[in-house]
């Protein structure tokens, strides 16, 4: 979609107002996608921590050997 908007803007078929509106729209979409990606990353990290905590509690503790 971004390529389509760029092609329209560069072809001279868009008004200045139209170009500004396209830029604002794509900036908004970009912001939402970044927020969504960040939320997915936080969720994935939380799931990994939970998995690590669960796996760590299941491992038997080794007694230190005297040496």
Image (cartoon, rainbow, N blue to C red):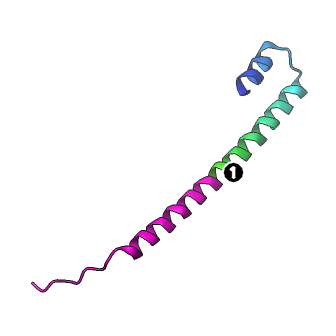
Residue at 81% from the left image edge and 36% from the top image edge: 25
Q: Is residue 46 above or below residue 24?
A: below
- Residue at left offset 39%, top offset 74%: 58
Crowd rating for badge 1 (residues with CA inside 10 Å; few <14, some 14–19, many 20+): few
Residue 51 within the segment the image draws in magenta: yes
Name the spot of residue 6 as percent of width and height, x first: 74, 22
**Residue 33: x percent and y percent?**
69, 44
- Tag 1's secondary structure? helix
In the image, residue 29 above or below residue 56: above
Query: In the image, 39: left or right of 32?
Result: left
Closer to the camera, 4 or 46?
46
Q: Is residue 59 above or below residue 6?
A: below
Q: Residue furthest bottom?
A: 66
From this viewpoint, which residue is outermost toward the left? 67
Q: Look at the image and give the residue range highlighted in magenta.
A: 39-67
At horizontal 79% and vertical 13% (from top left) the residue drawn is: 11
Asked which quadrant contains residue 1, the reply is top right
What is the magenta segment's predominant secondary structure?
helix
Q: Residue at x 68, y 50 (%)?
A: 36
Taking the magenta stretch, the answer to whether it contains residue 64 is yes
User: Which of the image's four quarters has the C terminus?
Assistant: bottom left
Residue that mark 1 sits on: 35
Q: Is residue 10 above or below residue 42?
A: above
């Amino acid at each position: 979609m971004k390529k389509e908007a760029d092609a329209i803007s560069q072809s001279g078929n868009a008004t200045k107002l139209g170009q500004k509106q396209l830029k604002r729209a794509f900036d908004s979409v970009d912001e939402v996608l970044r927020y969504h990606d960040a939320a997915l990353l936080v969720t994935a990290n939380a799931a990994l921590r939970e998995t690590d905590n669960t796996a760590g509690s299941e491992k038997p503790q080794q007694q230190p050997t005297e040496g």
